[in-house]
Image: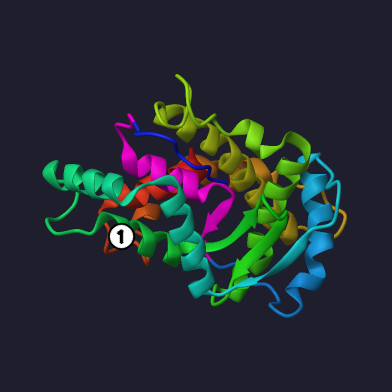
Amino acid sequence: TMKHRRGPSQSSEPVIQVLVTLLLCAIPATPAVAQEAGGIFDQTQAIAATVGQLRGLAPKDRFQVGYKSREELREVVVTKIQEEYSQERLDSDGAMLIRLGMLPPGTDYGQLIEDLLSAQIAGFYDQKTDALYLVEGSDPATERVTIAHEIFHGIQDQHFDLDTVSPPEHGPMGRDHNDDYLLATTALVEGDATILMFDFTYAEMLPAGASPVDSPMFDSMIKPMLENLDPAAFGQAPGLADVPSWLGQSLIFPYLR
């Protein structure tokens, strides 16, 4: 989902720019929900149909699915960072964050972002190939909900073309000048998919044929859960404990807000 940058950024919040751009159409590791792990890809089209019904946006085509290893995911992350940011820019941003006291002295900022994203992403949708990937080694109990989240990104792309939702590269609303606009559009895309993910998880708990929309349990269970989600708690989840809390919260923000 990243495009080549043709010039220096005027960004005042570089970490937000890096994180939300890389995480568009990705999902971080989520709390486990018990499901059968076997034959997950055989269930993909059925999951797509359920997602389309829940959201009111039917899939227009079938989805290709597969696994990526952590090493392959790291290659994807590194390539996208290199496409978007020069090493000079990463070094400059890192030095600024250290000077502001937001990172410990001696931190390799680029390496930190690379390690963080490579460890946290559990699945992603590739707009270029219209394919969905789970990351090998992710919790099997989360695979159905991860597939649902990523399938919905595919459905978003089919109906709305995510390239047209993302900010342009240049100009007053461009990604090289306006981090707030990029963050807002990413939160729109990811927030939509997160709410769908909750709906899907809740629907799996209901008896066959029951509608989550008509269930009184929705207001008593899901709505309060969404309202009470604490980005700070997610930002210090296992795997994020060794990074500054503001960085973990930046990672989670588009999903919860």
* Residue situated furthest bottom in the rendering: 38
On the image, the x and y values in percent for residue 174 come to: 48, 27
Q: Is residue 11 magenta?
A: yes
> Which one is nearer the viewer's eye here, 200 or 1?
1
Q: Residue placed at 60% from the left, 58% from the top?
A: 124
Q: Is residue 166 above or below residue 244?
A: above
The residue that disc 1 covers is 112
Q: Which residues are magenta?
A: 10-31
Q: Is residue 168 magenta?
A: no
In this image, 200 relative to 179: left or right?
right
| SS class, disc 1 | helix
Residue 157: percent from left, percent from top: 72, 42
Q: Residue at x 31, y 56 (%)?
A: 110
x and y percentages locating residue 90 in the rendered image: 29, 49
Residue type, numbered disc 1:
Leu
In the depicted view, which residue is nearer to us: 141 or 172?
A: 172
* Side of 83 where 211 appears, left or right: right
- Residue placed at 35% from the left, 33% from the top? 9
